Each structure stands twice: as structure tokens, then as C-alpha cells.
Amino acid sequence: MESADPAYLPISQVAEVAFCPRNFYYRAVEKIDLTDARMAQGSIAERKREARASIVREGKLQVRSVTVSSETLGVIGVIDVLEEGAFPCPVEYKLGSASEGLYERVQLCLQAMCLEETLGRSVPYGYLYYAGSRKRVCIDFDDILKDKALECVAEARRLMESPTRPEPVNDWRCPGCSLLPICMPSEDRFLDGVGQKPRKPLPSLGIEHVVYVDEQGAYLRKDGSRLAVTKEGQTLASVPLGHVDQLVLAGNVNLSTPLLKHLLKYDVEVVLLNSYGKYEGRFTTELSKNAVLRLRQYERSKEESFRMQVARGIVLGKIQNMRAFLMRGNRTRGNAVLEEAIRQLSSLFPTVERATGLDVLLGVEGAASHTYFQGFAALLGEEIGFDFEKRTRRPPRDPVNALLSLGYTLLCSDCLTACQIAGLDPYVGFYHIPVYGRPALALDLMEEFRVLLVDSVVLSLINRGSIRPNDFEEKYGGWFLTERGREKFYAAYGQRKNTDVTHPIFEYTLPYRRVLELQARLLSKVVMEDIPAYQAFATR
């Protein structure tokens, strides 16, 4: 039987160990790779060099993009430029000014060690060329550097087999790292109780610009660099494609294949709803490559104690947001129904803390929701013309429930997306039981945001008179928004997602749409045991 080929590690990734072991783990083990502006510039410069396979410069032949490997070390890489002379001399190109960092020197040294093994010749030194300063720096491959390179290879092998991520460095290396939004070193260390509170929110990776289309019979197509919405030959809207992060289509809305391919290529989701606002499906790009995280998620979903820990945090956060919402609404009312609802919700906190099983938590949450919606009904203006007694769905029995159902559908879709961005499987939850076709983890995440992102919008639209009874229609025993009513709701919901809020734990300000992503990433860190417990987003 033939032996399996050795597992070669990319030299560029092995060298990351010298810079930040956690960075290596994300890239090599979890297969996460984000391209920032600096890396994109480097790729463009590399393609330009590759366009010239070889060139004679200063009397020396320079060969571009030479692949080298070492069976002994088990590494493989590409030398930017191999310069022939007294010996084959590797040259590695870097952006910026000369810094001679350990990462760059280890990378160059490993390339030279591959050359020495392959050619049987000594390679005493190489060069780092910094495009920013147009400066060449000679790097001697002495025993100290070679020993460090071998240490990096050994550590890389160890990390490849490790079930946990290395600790974040959380120092000067972090601000320039493209993986900063995923690694979250400041937040990680703070929640672990060993670091200071982070000063500012992370760059967003999530959805900012959402385009809703529910004009029945509309047709969407790619018009150059723009998204064109037409109907019966007339242009209804034209939006730059660069401004579209998500497309939500409701009812009989069609789109062209070239447009769909463009959206998939640039990671723009297409969410499909029926004409009544019920979720039907989505077009999205391939599943996250982070199989390590998902495997750990599947393992931990079978741990009863872990599920209880996460579920308890979710339910506590939901009840706290319910109570805070009713308390704010009762500041100027002094309503007895609201005061009693607030008192009952407050009394449930110890019950959640003492809960010993998921079935108990589900019962407590059900009691909390029943109490909350009694208070919610008291917040609705009596003169508006809306009747609401309790939460009903499938179908919603009154206009208020129709608004809540549509809002929860949109929120569930946003939470599903947040889970996917964080690398999690949205269908395997910890609080909600996985059932075929149910995005259990997305439902877990949305519990703490129901009040904040949906109920608040519904109450505001009704009490301000923005939504009227004539914005609804009764069909098949249920109430549904008209097309005009849906337009109003989409606009209000989108505005709410872009509302800035102070994070209760980190105390920096960011819009709700980014809070969804942040909470999903925190949940992924709990799964990977980077932080001890999940803390829901709970307002004060």
C-alpha cells in the first residue's frame, strides 16, 4: 500500500506563527481569510510581476513566481523572484517601508531552506524588497534564524492538531491585522477578565444596505454597474450595485441570471418572501469554510450543560429587554397593567437562574411572553383603531400581529445571515431544538432582539399614525399588510437597524445591524471556549 503524500503547509502561513499564532490558527486551521486594502494592493502588484515570467536586471536573470517545497520540513511556497547569480537568491516583495519583521525573515528563510534541500546548494542570504521605500534589505540565513524557522514549523504542526485557539496577543500587532474584526482581541480579553474595556467598535463585515422590492410583476436586471428595477418596460428604480449588501424580494418579483450571478459573486444575499411577508428561502454563497468551528458547534450542541448555559443567557436577556421596554413606555403613564407586568417579569429572573432544564426555561419564557404582551397591548393608543389582545400567528388574527409577524420574519433572516457571517451553522441551535428546516441558532440569536428591533418599530408606527387600518387587508382568516403598508414597514425596520446604540458590555456605540454580527461572533467564541459564557445584548 502506498503511503499518503505528506501534508505540506504553506510557508506564508507558517511564517504567521512568528507574527501571531492566533492569526495562523484562523487562517490555516479554520480556513478564514479576509482581504483588506493592503492585501489587495499586494495581490495586484504580484499579478503585475507574474505577467513578466522572467527579466534580466543589472546583469542577473530574475525568474518570477517560483514554487519551492521541502519534503523534510513539509512546507511549500512561492518565491516572488528568484535571482540567479553565484547562487539562487530568493527575493520577497513587501508593501510599505523596510521593517525587517520576524515574520518576513522567517518566510524568506524557509524559502531558502527549500531551495537548499532541492538543489543541494547553499543559499547564504536573500532579500526583502519594500515597495513603499523601494529599498532592498539583505537577510542573512544564519543558524539563529534557521532555528527560529524550524520552531515555527514545529509550532504550526502542533497548532494544526490543537482543538483550541491560541490566546489573542492584543497589542501593537492587532490594529493592522486584516483578521481583527473576527479575532476581536480586546473584546475577548475583556470578557475573559484579563483586559481593559475596548475603546471602539470593530469594522463591520455585515449587511449595511438592504434593498426591498415588493412591486408585483417587477423585473430586476444588471444594467452595467447598476441594479435596474423595471415593470412593463418602465424603470421604477436604479441603484448602484456597490450599494447593495442584501436584496429582499416579496411575492411575484423576478430577476435576471446575470444579476443573480453578480450578486452571488460579490456575496450579496437574495432573500425571498411570499407576498404576505412569510420567509420562503434565499440565494447565498457557499457555506463558511470554517469547518472547525461548525464541528465544535455540533459537539457542544449535544452537551446539556453547555446548552443550558447559553439558553439561560438568552432567556435572561430577552426578559430584561421586555422589562426595560415596558418600563420606558410606562414612565409617563403610570398604568396599573404595565406596573403589574413589570413586577411579574422582574420576579422571573431568579426562576431563570435556578432552571435545571431546557423545558423549564421554555416554560419561563412562555410565561414572560404572555405577561409582556399584556403590557404591550396597554402601550397601544386606544384611539388609533387597532385591537390587540395576545400574540397570534399562522395566520395573524389582527393588524398588530401582522406587523409583528413580518418584523420577526425579517429579523430571523438577519440573524440567519449574522450566524453565517460568524461561521456558525444557523440550523443547529442551543436553546431551540433543531428541527428539519428550522434555523434554530438564528432563532436563538433573535430572542434578545425581538423587542429592540421589531416591537419598538411596531409600536412607533402605530402610535405615530404612520400605519393605519387601511394599510391592511383581511384574507383567509388572517390580516396582512398591503403593498403600501409593507413599504412603510420596510423603511421603518431598516431605519431602526441603522440606529446607533451603546453596547451594554463594551460601552462603545454602533448600529443595531452591527450588534447582530457582534453577538453572533461572541457566541462563536463561547463555542470555541475563547470566552467563558454568552452574554445577551440587554438594554438598561
Image (cartoon, rainbow, N blue to C red):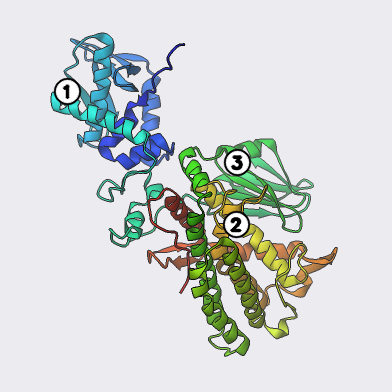
Residue 395 figure quarter: bottom right
- Where residue 125 appears, as percent x and y from the top left, is 17, 20
Residue in the picture at 52% in, 61% down: 311
Seen at 40% across and 20% down, the residue is: 51
Q: Check whether the beta carbons of the residues at disc 1 and disc 3 lie within 8 A of each other.
A: no
| Type of amino acid under label 2 | His
Q: Which residue is mark 3?
A: 263
Name the disc covering residue 432, or none: 2
**Which badge, 2 or 3, is on the more N-terminal residue?**
3
Residue 143's quadrant in the figure?
Answer: top left
Tag in front: 2 or 3: 2
Q: Quadrant of the C terminus?
A: bottom left
**325 left or right of 170 in image:** right
Q: Could you tell which of marks 1 and 2 lies nearer the N-terminus?
A: 1
Q: Nearer the observer, disc 1 or disc 2?
A: 2
Indicate left or right for 428 with 96 as reference: right
